[in-house]
Amino acid sequence: MKFIIFSDVHSNLESLQSFCSVTESILHDKKVCLGDIVGYNADPNPVVEWIRDKTDFALAGNHDYSVLNKTDASYLNPAAYQASLWTRRNLTNSNKDFLNALPIEKEEDGIYWVHSSPFEPKKWHYVLTKKNAEKNFNYFDQAICFVGHSHLPGIFEKNKNNKVYSHDTTKEELDPESRYIINVGSLGQPRDGNPDPVFVFYDSVSHIVKFFRFSYDLFITQQKIIACGLPYTLADRLRNGL
């Protein structure tokens, strides 16, 4: 089965529109969204509606839960918190109902899918280091786990000798004897120093994982943020990919 997997769209409609154009030419069976559909940017309603209509399944993330007041938002930085409150005021009830019904983890197609981490997924931990990954491999049984949340694309591998490696790569052929935690990065707010959004293609037959990056009309997204009265810092960080 062929998957297109993405996460952390964060109400970025322009990125989502470019993503649609890019993925039209990629043969796939399922589209999967790993959460944080809203937050930060200025188009929560059209983004949620696209996710509702076009994905095969989606998860909720901490920003989605924050907007619904289902998780403690006090840990968010001030700009993120302001964006959460703004989104809560502007999101339609039907879109809130959709987000409210989403799980934060799922087992399907022999894969474990989660927004944040296999370990305590409702506490929104990050999987950023080999040490983090080594711990998290103990909390799912499948060979592959896909995550989002950190906005940092990459691969952690645990080989048959139980040694954990990290891979920062654009394309990888997975070893059938290893296990993997794969972060698909962010469609709406990249943080690895590259402002271009990123998503993952995974072929479960050939065991190929490929990371795709693309450009979008970032300036329009920034102008919308400012026009809506959201913090300027949210527009600035998009330009810097931070």
Image (spheres, rainbow, N blue to C red):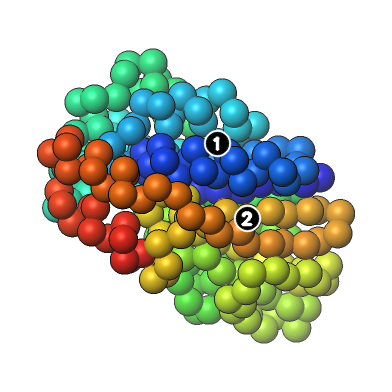
| Any part of residue 46 in sight | yes
At x 83%, y 67%, the residue is 176
> Is 173 placed left or right of 52 in the picture?
right
Number of dots carrying numbers: 2
Give the SS element for disc 2: strand
Q: Is residue 68 above or below residue 168?
A: above
At x 51%, y 31%, the residue is 51
**Mark 2 Cα within 10 Å, few/some/many (few <14, many 20+)?**
many
* Residue 22 percent across, percent down from the top left: 61, 46
- Return the disc, 2 or 1, that comes first in the chain's sequence: 1
> Is 184 placed left or right of 228 in the picture?
right
> Which residue bears the numbered disc 1?
58
Q: Quadrant of the N terminus?
A: top right
> Is 13 placed left or right of 86 in the picture?
right
Which residue is situated farthest in the top direction here? 94
Amino acid under disc 2:
Val
**Mark 1 Cα within 10 Å, few/some/many (few <14, many 20+)?**
many
User: Residue 84 sits in which quadrant?
Assistant: top left
- Residue 200 numbered tag: 2
At x 76%, y 38%, the residue is 29
The answer to whether mark 2 and mark 1 are in CB contact below 8 A is: no
Amino acid under disc 1:
Ala
At x 61%, y 59%, the residue is 212
* Residue 71 percent across, percent down from the top left: 29, 41
Which residue is situated farthest in the right direction here? 205
Q: Is residue 179 above or below residue 164?
A: above
**CA gap, disc 2 and disc 1:** 15 Å
* Residue 100 percent across, percent down from the top left: 41, 27
> Residue 36 or 161: which is nearer the viewer?
36
Give the SS element for disc 1: strand
* Residue 87 percent across, percent down from the top left: 25, 33
